[in-house]
């Protein structure tokens, strides 16, 4: 399997060490299941009408995404020589608006996610949920496939295996905390395991080294949007242990620009 590391949004309102945040999306070429996206970032409809799709608070107050339609996954996929219809599956870490904006660009794709996350997005209970989950983004009626039954563990983590229609090299790994059903996605490639940890952390210092550290601005943002602080810190501690014990596994989050650049320059195909 080939993996392309795409940057599908530039979040100008938040930065880490002077750099704007990214939206790190994976495009996985599989031999039998077509193209698979891990998250979508913002989509073409978002870039066409940012305030109505994303909400004024997200657009004007804290995220201020750069209006650049070429960043939409569908445009990058076409630039690689593929057709949008080649994307047959999308695996979601969670359903925050900056992770699912591109769903409507791939209306025929099957959408895989944890059952607890879909339940939370559909219910939209409470102040945070009503702002992070945007029903406009799935108004086209996607084919959702949800999972909760765990199989054989993955490096000490609970793992959901056997995603319908996908090869066994792709796993959902529960990392609850940021949202109620937040997961990481592990991909077994010829070059070793990749682990997209979604929004389990923003600053690599949170999961590297013996002690958690986080830059102030993103620490404050995470505190505001976190659903379960205890679970998030617990899973960050597990990620620190994974990094220490298995440096051969490439662990990265959804928004850190340094990790995205490192992945894009590591020999994996990429588009930016």
Image (tube, grey):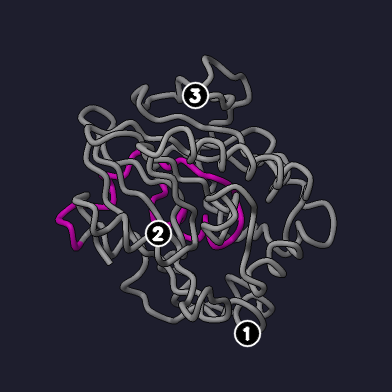
- Which residue in the protein does label 2 denote? 259
Q: What residue is shown at x 46% (from left), y 53% (from top)?
A: 103
Mark 1 and mark 2 lie on one chain; the one further toward the N terminus is: 1
- Asked whether, in this view, residue 113 is left or right of residue 122, the answer is left
Mark 3 and mark 2 lie on one chain; the one further toward the N terminus is: 3
**Residue 118 visible here:** no
Query: Is residue 92 one of those drawn in magenta?
Result: yes
Mark seen at residue 60: 1
- Asked whether, in this view, residue 12 is left or right of residue 44, the answer is right
Dividing the image into 4 quarters, which one contains the C terminus?
bottom left
Mark 3 and mark 2: span between their CA atoms?
Answer: 22 Å
Q: Position of residue 240 (x, y in %)?
A: 56, 43
Label 1 with label 2: CB-CB less than 8 Å: no
Q: Position of residue 70 (x, y in %)?
A: 31, 73
Mark 3 and mark 1 lie on one chain; the one further toward the N terminus is: 1
Q: Indicate the secondary structure of the residue bearing disc 2.
A: helix
- Which residue in the protein does label 3 denote? 154
Q: Residues within 10 Å of mark 2 (few under 14, many from 20)?
A: some
Magenta span: 79-107
């Amino acid at each position: 399997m080939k993996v392309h590391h795409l940057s599908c949004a530039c979040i100008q309102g938040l930065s880490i060490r002077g750099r704007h945040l990214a939206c790190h999306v994976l495009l996985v070429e599989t031999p039998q299941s077509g193209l698979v996206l891990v998250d979508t970032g913002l989509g073409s409809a978002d870039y066409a009408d940012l305030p109505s799709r994303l909400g004024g608070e997200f657009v004007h107050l804290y995220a201020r995404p750069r209006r650049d339609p070429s960043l939409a996954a569908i445009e990058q996929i076409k630039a690689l020589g593929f057709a949008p219809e080649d994307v047959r599956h999308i695996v979601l870490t969670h359903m925050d608006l900056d992770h699912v904006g591109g769903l409507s660009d791939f209306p025929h794709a099957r959408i895989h996610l944890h059952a607890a996350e879909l339940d939370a997005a559909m219910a939209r209970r409470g102040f945070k949920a009503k702002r992070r989950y945007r029903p406009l983004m799935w108004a086209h009626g996607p084919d959702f496939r949800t999972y909760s039954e765990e199989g054989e563990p993955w490096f000490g983590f609970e793992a959901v295996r056997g995603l319908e229609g996908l090869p066994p090299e792709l796993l959902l790994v529960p990392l609850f905390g940021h949202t109620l059903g937040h997961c990481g996605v592990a991909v077994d490639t010829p070059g070793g395991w990749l682990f997209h940890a979604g929004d389990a952390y923003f600053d690599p210092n949170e999961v590297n080294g013996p002690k958690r550290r986080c830059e102030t601005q993103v620490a404050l943002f995470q505190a505001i949007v976190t659903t379960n602080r205890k679970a998030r810190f617990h899973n960050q501690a597990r990620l620190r242990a994974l990094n220490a014990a298995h440096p051969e596994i490439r662990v990265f989050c959804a928004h850190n620009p340094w990790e995205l650049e490192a992945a894009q320059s590591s020999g994996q195909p990429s588009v930016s």
